[in-house]
Image: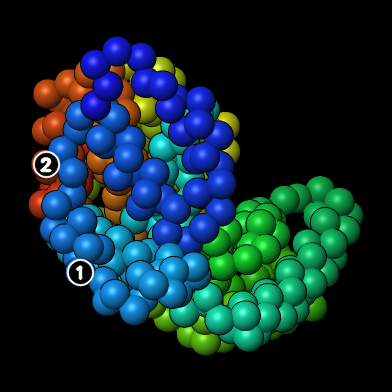
Amino acid sequence: MWQQENPLAQIWQTAQPVLRESPGGAFWIDWYQRTLDGRPQNWPLLRDVALIDNALWDEGGEALDREIKRLVATHRSGDGTALSRASPVDFDFDEHLQQMQIVGFAEDVAHLDDPAAVAAFSADAEELQEGLQDFLDFAADAGRSSNQAFRSALAAEKLLKELGRCNDAESIRARRLIMLGKTFADMALDDHERARLGEALTNMMDSQVSLLRTIYRKHLALALERLRPLMTLELGEQDPDELLAAAEKLAEMLENADNRELARLSPEARAVIEDFVDELRQQRGALGDASSPEREAALSKRFAEAYGAVAVAYGRLLEKGKPHVERASEGVDWVIRQYKRWDSLDKIADTIKDCSCY
């Protein structure tokens, strides 16, 4: 855009944090940064923004921001297969820090722009947090006395941590909450875990699972629907150990990215990627400990769903990070193309295994 040094560079750096505070700010940051970098624009989106009703442009403020945010979500959701759009998290590039931040999907919580809706969600989430903390406290006491750790307690701890960061609609990562909740709810179906917990702790766990499902249906129904394609995945003839090894290797590549061929991750994003892999390991461990053919079949299904979620998150990260690296390799372009076509675990597995060999 500028033939020599950008005379507005310092002003632009100062303006970005302010823009990020508004619901539609990400759109303006992306639009202007693309202009500065000489990168292609999303012209269909820009056309729809330009055609927003004049009355809304005149009104400006939050109403205009919400409409721009809605249009961004609409254009983003129409790209790729339903499975490729089922990532449990999204990513944004922080131009100032030059790293990928992990965020939620704005469309999942658009209905929580209403203060009353946010208050209702917060009240329910607070009740769940208190119940989960009670469960963790009692489980810790039981674990110390019996010298054993509970998988359900680890799942509850991760869910509680994610709930703790939901201070407003902008900070809610709805799909991540749902996936963590599903892991915790799975523990309530594990006969071995229930036997280890004992009746009192099992009843506490069941109570929190019931409240969790109520919250999801009441407040996060759209995010549940977005994740539904993951539930169709089947492990089939795939070897879970091979799948896990490929996911671990790709995670290591992503965590070591330096903005040359892969976008650098923020510390929090690296931690979440590590959590993804750790959760897969737990799923694999639970599958190996299945106490019956029926339980093995259920856990195979759950492993396939969790693996699909991790893989789609990887694909989303590569897609969102590509415009911000020095030189995206042909391998990265190939992975993104394949990711957009995913409709089965077999296709996911083929891609992840191939790209983990780079």
Where on the picture, by quarter, is residue 253? top left
* Side of 172 where 137 appears, left or right: right
Task: Give the percent coordinates (x, y) of residue 85.
Answer: 26, 59
Report which residue position mark 2 lands on. 337
Amino acid of disc 1:
Leu
Pick the front one: 51 or 94: 51
Residue 132 in sight from this viewpoint:
yes
Report which residue position mark 1 lands on. 51
Pick the front one: 126 or 321: 321
Task: Give the percent coordinates (x, y) of residue 280.
Answer: 44, 47
* Side of 131 where 283 appears, left or right: left
Q: Residues within 10 Å of mark 1 (few under 14, many from 20)?
A: few
Residue under the image location 11 percent in, 41 percent down: 337
Task: Give the percent coordinates (x, y) of residue 46.
Answer: 20, 56
Q: Residues within 10 Å of mark 2 (few under 14, many from 20)?
A: some
Q: Which mark is residue 254?
A: none
Pick the front one: 172 or 192: 172
Q: How many marks?
A: 2
Residue under the image location 20 percent in, 29 percent down: 38
Pick the front one: 291 or 162: 162
Residue 282 in sight from this viewpoint:
no
Residue under the image location 41 percent in, 37 percent down: 93
- Earlier-in-chain disc, 2 versus 1: 1
Which of discs 2 and 1 lies nearer the camera? The answer is 1
What colour scheme governs how the chains and residues are painted in the rendered image of this protein?
A: rainbow
Marks 2 and 1 close (CB-CB < 8 Å): no
Residue under the image location 36 percent in, 27 percent down: 263
Label 2: which secondary element: helix
Amino acid of disc 2:
Arg
**Looking at the image, residue 317 lies above or below residue 1:** below
In the picture, the quarter occupied by the C terminus is top left
